[in-house]
Amino acid sequence: MVNLHLLKLQLTITDYIVAKRIRNSSDPTPYLNQLPAYTIARCPYCLAAISERLDTYSVQGWSRSYGKSVYHPYAVLNHCEHFTLVEPFFHFHGIWPDEAKGMFGPEKPHVIGTLLESGKCLAVIHALPVCRIENDTFVPRYTLFMISYFSEQPENAYDTVINFNRRYTDEPYTPFPFAEPPYDAPQWWDLCYWGSQKLLFWLDSNDPDLPLKSGDCNSFPYGNIEGRRFSHGFPYPLPKSYDFKR
Ligand SMILES: [Zn+2]
């Protein structure tokens, strides 16, 4: 399990279930305020720690985000002026997540290459474990990968992603900030490549201060992640041809 030592479990099962009852109410802040605070990235421009509260107790209640926060817009603790967007990727490690409901992106993380190739953004990847409740115990089973983007012109960069994704979105819908890598851009999946180009950084989870790191494939910690490469809604079944255990 990646970065298991970073997992924060502060609530009992009972306290968690009680707190979460207001997850979908008009004011979920009392629940959100009880969630653990995590550093999710560090800005490559100003080095500010980017932090949010995340529900790492369970995947229940999670779904694909709109890019301005990992879990919930009311759970953002610190975003610097360069923060542009963040894309979460849940990896279920071969477990069928009965408790998940909603649309999830690919398991295998990828960059938004158009933002990096154009020089509009620098990206940072980090990962945290997420639990499932088994026999009234929080058991870390899943991995949440997060790729955050930073820019000196964040609004311009965000608009660039939206306009890029219009080609995949029917009118009159507004595109999501995320789309799977185009077929003619397989390098978006190659995190090691972007790391070696000094366009994708990572947090050194062996250091309590979680400093930014960059380097080639020998030092990049997330270069060999495999998994589902397409978005999927749960609890709907995956295609019969898909080998979920791979
Ligand atoms: Zn910054």
Image (spheres, rainbow, N blue to C red):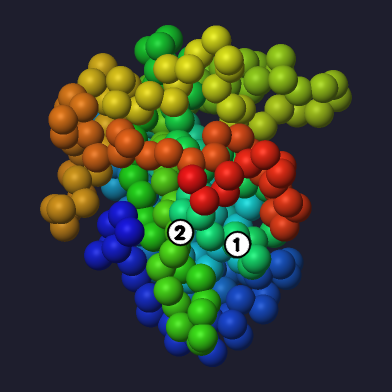
Residue at 38% over, 24% down:
190
**Does residue 156 appear left or right of residue 167 in this picture?**
left
Mark with earlier residue (1, 2): 1
Q: Is mark 1 within 8 Å of ligand 1?
A: no
Mark 2 and mark 1 in contact (Cβ < 8 Å)? yes
Q: Position of residue 20 (x, y in %)?
A: 61, 76
Residue 131 - label: none
**Which residue carries the number 1 mark?**
97
* Image position of 233 with respect to 123: above or below: below
- Depth check, front residue: 126 or 136: 136
Residue at 44% over, 64% down:
141
Residue 142 - label: 2
Q: CA distance from mark 1 to mark 2?
A: 9 Å
**Residue type at mark 1?**
Pro
Q: Position of residue 151 (x, y in %)?
A: 40, 24
- Determine the residue located farthest toward the right in the rendered image: 172
- Depth check, front residue: 184 or 24: 184
- Residue at disc 1, secondary structure: loop
Residue 179 seen from this side: yes
**Does residue 128 appear left or right of residue 232 in this picture?**
left
* Image position of 100 with respect to 158: above or below: below
**Residue type at mark 2?**
Tyr
- Depth check, front residue: 91 or 211: 91
Residue at 55% over, 22% down:
181
Residue 113 seen from this side: no
* Image position of 78 with respect to 193: above or below: below
